[in-house]
Amino acid sequence: MIQPIIPKRQRHIIDVVHWDADAEFGVFPQGARAKEAVFAPREQIDECLVPLKRYLFKRSKRSYPDQFWGEVIAYRVGCCMGLEVPPAFAAVNSGTGYSAALIEWFYDDHQRFVHAGDFLQAIVPDFERTQGKQHNLTDAAGLLRAMAIGKMLKGDWRQWLADMLVFDAVIGNTDRHQDNWGFVFSPVENDVSVICHVAPLFDNGTSLGHERFIDRVQGWNEGDVDRYIERGMHHMGKTRLEGFASAKHAELVRHALTVWPGTREIVVQRLNLLEAGLPRLLQDLIELGGDVPLSIGRADFVRRLIARRLALLRANML
């Protein structure tokens, strides 16, 4: 039986103004939003933080100043569903005035992270890396299957794919491209070989209706919400043969459950957990306040989207 993960909870908005910048990563180049790697101080300033741990200070797009809350909420959604998502907290740099998500680094210095795109580019020689035009579920499954057959990959890769797709479906993530998932490699003690596991579900901020201004959606009826959800696309297509044709979230979930029916039971358990936890999912985040708070209007819109996505997914899975 799948159990929810108890999330790390912050007591206040975390100020990183005096945190040390990471000389190795500095201003982090990957992705579209400004971010930088920093180290937590040695002293325990909030029980949610790991002293001296590396974190990513990830800002919003300029047009959507409260977008960073999407990373924080996605972490809470993942925990509620029993999924591994990097812990994410609301933060500020009081020196620059920037608010951002503060995301716990998901691998240690003795480990190595490799983007899925690096492997897919080797499998598909003409793989278009900038937009990931050939990014598709069939090739992703083939990559994971090959690594599992070679006894390099730990865990149930079919379940991981189904779980990833249903997580992205409930948050409406449109940006799970080939470099927004990957593998964490760890050396094997007393051995020259390495083993790996699929990385936690990271980079979840392009989701949860972040691009919609609250004053423009407060009057939405159920039809408006359904049309908005229906337009949403996952980054992946089903097969390479379809070309650059991203599939709809629910379509990919249905396809995965059809191809791998053994994954359905756990997927249903995860949806049940989220439905049960949704009413109280965001209250403590609203109470944090801050320069760019999670407003009641934004929280209500997020809950409304998630609740409707859950209902539509259940209907689609029958």
Image (tube, rainbow, N blue to C red):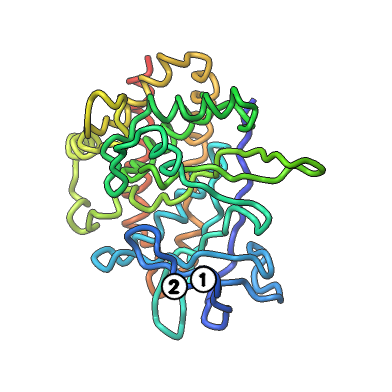
Instruction: Name which residue lies at 49% across and 19% down.
Output: 264
* Residue 285 place in picture, x, y as percent: 48, 59
Which of the numbered marks, if any, corresponds to residue 290? 2
Query: Is residue 149 found left or right of 316 in the rendered image?
Result: right
Which of the numbered marks, if any, corresponds to residue 165? none
Query: Is residue 6 found left or right of 239 in the rendered image?
Result: right
Instruction: Name which residue lies at 52% across and 24% down.
Output: 145
Q: Marks 1 and 2: CB-CB under 8 Å?
A: yes
Residue furthest toward the bottom?
Answer: 95
158 and 41: which is toward the camera? 158
- Label 2: how many Cα within 10 Å (few below 14, some 14–19, many 20+): some
Q: Earlier in the sequence, mark 1 or mark 2?
A: 1
- The N terminus: image quadrant: top right
* Residue 99 place in picture, x, y as percent: 41, 72
- Label 1: how many Cα within 10 Å (few below 14, some 14–19, many 20+): many
53 and 209: which is toward the camera? 53
| Residue 280 visible at all | no
* Residue 23 place in picture, x, y as percent: 55, 75
Real-space CA distance between mark 1 and mark 2, rounded to the nearest whole angstrom:
6 Å
Secondary structure at numbered mark 1: loop
Please, is residue 40 above or below residue 255 in the view?
A: below
Query: Mark 1 sits on what residue?
Result: 13
The three-letter amino acid code for the residue at tag 2 is: Gly
Secondary structure at numbered mark 2: loop
Q: Residue 251 sits in which quadrant?
A: top left
| Residue 2 visible at all | yes
The three-letter amino acid code for the residue at tag 1 is: Ile
